[in-house]
Image (cartoon, rainbow, N blue to C red):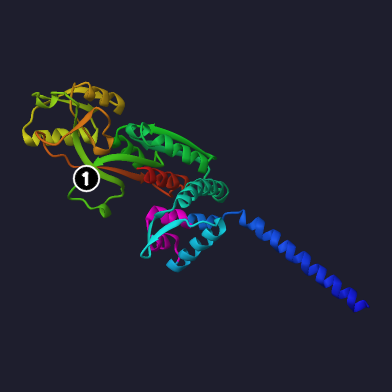
Amino acid sequence: MEWLNILKIDISNKVISKRNDGLFMQIAKRNLDIDLLRTLVAIADSGSFSTAATQLGRTQSAVSLQIKRLEETVGQALLNRSQGRVAGPTAEGQVLIDYGRRILRLNDEAYNCFNKPSLAGKLRLGLPEELMESIFPQVLTDFSKACPRVELSVRCDLSLRLAALVDAGELDLAIVKRVANRTETDETTDWRILRREPLVWFAGEGSNAIDQRPLPLAVFHEGCVFRMAAIAALAGAGVPWRAAFVGSSFTALRHAVVAGIAVTPLPRSLATAGLIEVREQLPFLPDAELTSRFGPGEVLSAARHLEQLFESRI
């Protein structure tokens, strides 16, 4: 009878094991795999399996398998497919993509907090004032979360002064403005271009400032690269000008132009309500560039991470 008792025990253990396996599968289905979510978001951002596969360092078949696994986990189709291509997310897929972005952001913040112990100490940053009024608040929020142990000090100034300060080692990272030099290639300069766009003339809506002579200008203080580019262009075209407004704040300059006091040279991306781009009557301006440079010596990990944040927002 002993063998019968052993058989009963073995059968009982198998039943318990099977029940436990089923319970484990139920619990596992409640957890969304971070890697699968990252793949879904990559496909949504790039619009294709192949591009997402390249970005993630995987094969296209592996990416397809990951999406299949994720769809099995949630029990819903996540992507619309047309002739083998992604035609966009389904309604359920869009919901999961939105959740996925939030989950990945929190996951990456937590990982960076513990995986970058070198991101500590002091970091000196220089940047133009208009960035303080636009993207810097978002960059600072992201940087503070990723690098909570870094003490950040910020200096706003003219780009020429910031360039001199970073060259002298008084800044760890500088983001500066310049105008494109047609005779200089990107490879021959130490500055890294983060963005290039047209530098254009703006006037206030309904203003007659463009018809006045001398042409009234709203510009930043002497040494501003946009001011110098505008004056050079006007001189080359024989257009007389006068400084109708001089300031250091983009907000104040914008108000002066909207009020009809003057016209101003600014990157096209700074267009706001009340500003009208002048496409005729005034001379062509060179492209505007936003560039970055690290201080001399070993580049701080925190500085490199901050530069990446700026580049992602610009």
The stretch in magenta equals 39-58
Which part of the image, by quadrant, shows the C terminus?
A: top left
Q: How many marks?
A: 1
For the residue pair 195 and 11, the one nearer the viewer reads as 11
Q: Is residue 7 found left or right of 152 in the rendered image?
A: right
Which part of the image, by quadrant, shows the N terminus?
A: bottom right
In the image, is residue 31 part of the stretch drawn in magenta? no
Dividing the picture into quadrants, the one containing residue 243 is: top left
Around disc 1, counting alpha carbons within 10 Å, would you say few (fewer than 14), some (14 to 19), or many (20 or more)? many
Q: Is residue 236 found left or right of 189 in the rendered image?
A: left
Q: Position of residue 116 (x, y in %)?
A: 54, 49
Q: Is 2 drawn above or below residue 47 in the view shown?
A: below
Q: Position of residue 39 (x, y in %)?
A: 47, 57
Dividing the picture into quadrants, the one containing residue 137 is: top left
- Image point (22%, 25%), residue name: 257
Main SS class of the magenta portion in the image = helix
| Residue 294 visible in the displayed image | no
Q: Is residue 280 found left or right of 45 in the rendered image?
A: left
Q: Is 110 drawn above or below residue 21 in the view shown?
A: above
Q: Say what secondary structure mark 1 lies in.
A: loop
Q: Position of residue 135 (x, y in %)?
A: 38, 37
Dividing the picture into quadrants, the one containing residue 28 is: bottom right
**Furthest residue toward left:** 238
Q: Which residue is mark 1?
A: 180
- Image point (39%, 39%), residue name: 171
Amino acid type at mark 1: Ala
For the residue pair 294 and 212, the one nearer the viewer reads as 212
| Residue 287 visible in the displayed image | yes
Q: Position of residue 86 (x, y in %)?
A: 38, 59
For the residue pair 220 and 95, the one nearer the viewer reads as 95
Q: Is residue 93 found left or right of 27 in the rendered image?
A: left
